[in-house]
Image: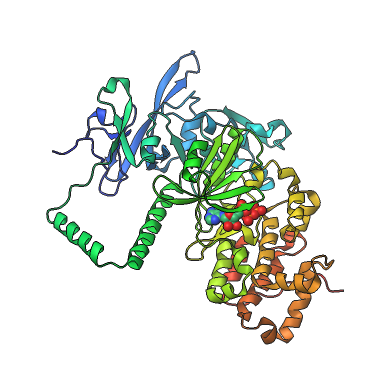
Amino acid sequence: MQDECAPARCGDSGMEIRFPFWLKGRQPDYCGYPGFGLSCPKSNRTEFELQLPVKSLTKDILIPVSVKVSIQEINYASQVMKISAVNASCLPKELVGMNSSVFQFEISEEDLSPYTLFNCSPIYTKKHPDLGNEVACLRDHDYRVVGFPSLYGISDLPLSSCIKMYDISNFPLEVFNGLSEYSSNETFVHWSRPSCASCEAEGKYCKLKNNDTSQEIQCFDIPKQPQQPGHKGATLGLLLVVMVGIVSGMFIFKRKKEDQRKSEIFLEDHKPFRITSFSYADIKRITNQFKEKLGEGSYGRVYKGKLPNEITVAVKLLNNFRGNAEEFISQVKRIGTINHVNVICLVGYCADGNRRALVYEFMQNDSLQKIVASENQIHSLGCKKWQEIAIGIAKGIEHIQKGSNRRILHLDTKPQNILLDENYNPKITDIGLAKLSSKELDLVSIIASQGMTDYVAPEVLSSNFHNASDKSDVYSFGMLLFDMAGRKKRYHAEAGDSSQVYFPEWMYNHLNMEEDASTQINGDRNSNVDKKLIITGLWCTQWYPEDRPSMNIVVQMLERENMPIMPPNPFLP
Ligand SMILES: Nc1ncnc2c1ncn2[C@@H]1O[C@H](COP(=O)(O)OP(=O)(O)OP(=O)(O)O)[C@@H](O)[C@H]1O
């Protein structure tokens, strides 16, 4: 007999709908949790009515109002759904008009940061593109709507060309900050009740206990798909073949492929969502009591771990962190929304008591530093891959810079922070960690103690990070390109670690010398790829930030077939 509560879909390609959600009109209401009924107005589109208790303007009463939203995705494990306004209208506009106290659909406190919306003249956003979060879909030709987290201390902001509109404390931050990958017309809402996360973590589903009036839930095994007739025999045959015939090498290969596929699906599932929260006990279980240490950096130790669904992860236990759990979680969630092939995927975090940890996707091939240090490995990768790695890193940085309205600067771009996956695709890690670290204000001295000052732009070093901008990340990337072209190693070997010669100046002089004797100096490295990396690096490391290209131009320089032209040499007498 067919299970009437079996997972359903709107149309053939709609998302899977299962507990706590249920499909109105097609399933009985006990298939879901009260308030989680969905509908399918059109095939493949899944809709939900958010019930909002709205405060009446005249009387002190709450009036129920509903906003119809379209559901883009549901992540059952992290209990999050991505919603957008129906008919591509402006979600913030609909929500702003309603001074609701809470969503009927629960939103956890940690996501509700107080905000103020301002109506500003277009001059404001031109003058201060980085200050505040413009709500793009509320823009009109003669005004812009800009949101500021209240913790900014609004009285200190240059808001003379703005008029205050609303204080908002009850909508998630994402509605207003318009993260660029998700236009401001989309947002995430999540539910904390019913909590099926523990069932999901065990690889099970959950449902209402038989006595559904108590609204208690229970875990149950995911029902197996009914087998087609003839499948049994085939499975038995396959088993026999596996037992008798398959050599262990093939088995391992298949396992690896399968793991990789599972991993890809899992990460794909996680990327556009909020990341999972783990308790410290979870972290201990995941890392098998911190059994396998992968390494240690300035922020703490990194351990290999396995999630309950067998996905391998790297868990970074943070030594030093600043702020309380709320600040930590909100910064972590900002980092977690960055979704790009060249940026490491943050799977989860732990903020349990005074313990803090970050859970990342696991990278099989360690860091770029290991390769830069070994000439043999560079040769075995080949110059095409080498160039692709440089382009990948540049695209990752470009995305980090563009991908958030409140810009995230990396400020720690160096070969140690570029990890490589099984195909040697680069992924930038440690993004935004400076902000989580209690050492932030003294980052310069940490960097200096690590001997990493090479990568930090002069304006950052001289102002202890106060003058940092996107162009400071461009500078660090330029230095990394010199590393990749093998020139930093040569500089340190020739000029010595205590050299007073500014590295880009040394590079200009050497490039001219190398031009004269390029074949012997480059040995069997590909001189053209190296030259392209160096010239691009020289552009990126111009002394004045405004003379450096934007990351977008840097990507083009590296991708184009033609050799970029040399930047003017500022060190000529
Ligand atoms: N996601 C990951 N997958 C696999 N290994 C990792 C991962 N993250 C870190 N590691 C390993 O842990 C080591 C330490 O990493 P970590 O990021 O803490 O320090 P670092 O980048 O080397 O130094 P710093 O923190 O000073 O920048 C790395 O060299 C790498 O070998």
- The correct choice, above or below, for 485 with respect to 254 in the image is below
In the orientation shown, which residue stands out farthest toward the top? 59
Residue 246 shown left or right of residue 57 in the figure:
left
Is any atom of residue 425 visible in this view? yes
In the orientation shown, which residue stands out farthest toward the right? 573
Residue 175 shown left or right of residue 68 in the figure:
right
Residue 103 position, x and y percent, is: 44, 27
**Which colour scheme appears in the figure?**
rainbow
Residue 137 shown left or right of residue 125 in the figure:
left
Q: Residue at x 31, y 30 (%)?
A: 218
Disc tally is 0
- The correct choice, above or below, for 207 with respect to 10 in the image is above
Q: Residue at x 78, y 74 (%)?
A: 494
Using the image as rendered, state which of residue 128 and residue 431 is in the foreground: 431
Is any atom of residue 146 visible in this view? no
Q: Residue at x 28, y 26 (%)?
A: 209
Residue 64 position, x and y percent, is: 40, 21
Using the image as rendered, state which of residue 431 and residue 243 is in the foreground: 243
Q: Quadrant of the C terminus?
A: bottom right
Q: Residue at x 22, y 64 (%)?
A: 241
* Rendered-image quarter of ligand 1: bottom right
- The correct choice, above or below, for 60 with respect to 437 in the image is above
Using the image as rendered, state which of residue 39 and residue 375 is in the foreground: 375
Tell me where residue 537 sits by quadrant. Answer: bottom right
Residue 53 position, x and y percent, is: 43, 22
Residue 226 shown left or right of residue 320 in the figure:
left
Residue 567 position, x and y percent, is: 73, 72
